[in-house]
Image (cartoon, rainbow, N blue to C red):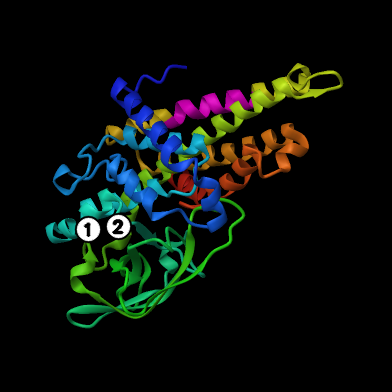
Amino acid sequence: MSRDHYTPEHEAFRDTVRTFLAKEVLPHHARWEQDGVVSRDVWRAAGRQGLLGLAVPEEFGGGGDGDFRYSAVLIEEFARAGASGLAISLHNDIVGPYLTSLGTEEQKRRWLPGHTSGEIITAVAMTEPGAGSDLQGIRTTATDRGDHYLLNGSKTFISNGILADLVVVVARTTPAGGSTGQSLLVVERGMPGFERGRNLDKIGQKAQDTAELFFHDVRVPKENLLGEENGAFPALMSHLAQERLAIAVGAAAAAEHVLDLTFAHVREREAFGRPLARLQHVRFEAAEMATECAVTREFVDRCVAEHCEGRLDPVRAAMAKWWATELQKRVADRCLQLHGGYGYMTEYPVARAFLDGRVQTIYGGTTEIMKEIIGRSLLG
């Protein structure tokens, strides 16, 4: 089906992204998976290619274009390439909007040029050992000490945690905490008391550095408060729709890609003297998955279009997120089955897609949380 919401300019950008992936990412990705982290050089290469800070104003080195369709193209092509190591959407679509919408002019001048060049790699630290999707359970504290905050606590499962030069930390700034007592503090590399723990050993996305972060009496200057004190929760909520839509975009593209790989496999692989593609069961599996992917693609594309028009609400974003990621998980599992024993070998892309995609239904808010959000909107 035609995707009319993409213009020739978007498709030209798609070609740029594919060229970047072929030259700067895919030749090195296997080594990065062994290392557990990508090279900082690839971040700088992405900056030179204009892939970072797409929506950041030009005066700070960004693309100056808030059209989310460019981000969607970027996410789709990384998903189709199976390039999970470079958390570029986190950098562009989550941290970037925090800095541009909440930052002071001084903060923007200080951080955005490096953000767009790849010299400053960013992360968001929300999740804690005892608080995941429930942000109101955060225990990390930031105590007002006059000209600075004293930050104490720990975070876990932080993407870009090892490489990050700038971390947006969610912390309690009132004793009560909850949704009205949290603030966003920017912690920079080298601040005394800021330590990184393990580069966590995950079942998938091996090249993506995911770490524990520890804060022990970190003196965070008041100049590093992002947005208003005690204003973290509404700021986070205002950007969650885009975060969840970005995950949905990647999930839909990943499902389509693994399906294409499987179609090629069953046409070539034989059983009982004929290609697998000739078996009725395989044809039915293909028909079901292709239909599910087509329906999901239409819904996700519609959400992208609505987001570009400023009309996407958090409920529809939650629908897109849980449905597309559950589809990705389901399609990867069924495609692995159709590969037989080969699907269990990590040298085959379907195995890596199965492992890399499993986290999609967890981060950005679990499927269960998404359903709760939708259910509350329907039933109160």
Q: Nearer the viewer, residue 47 or 320?
A: 47
Q: Nearer the viewer, residue 178 or 274?
A: 274
* Secondary element type, mark 1: helix
Q: Nearer the viewer, residue 379 or 59?
A: 59
Q: Which residues are magenta?
A: 288-300
Q: Residues within 10 Å of mark 1 (few under 14, many from 20)?
A: some
Pointers 2 and 1 in contact (C-beta within 8 Å): yes
Disc 2 versus disc 1: nearer the observer: 2
Residue 173: % across, % down: 30, 74
- Residue at the (53%, 57%) spot, across then down: 35
In the rendered structure, the answer to whether residue 155 lies left or right of residue 267 reads: left
Task: Name the amino acid type tagged 2.
Answer: Ile
Residue underneath mark 1? 111
* Secondary element type, mark 2: loop
Residue underneath mark 2? 120
The quadrant in which residue 266 appears is top right
Residue 9: % across, % down: 28, 24
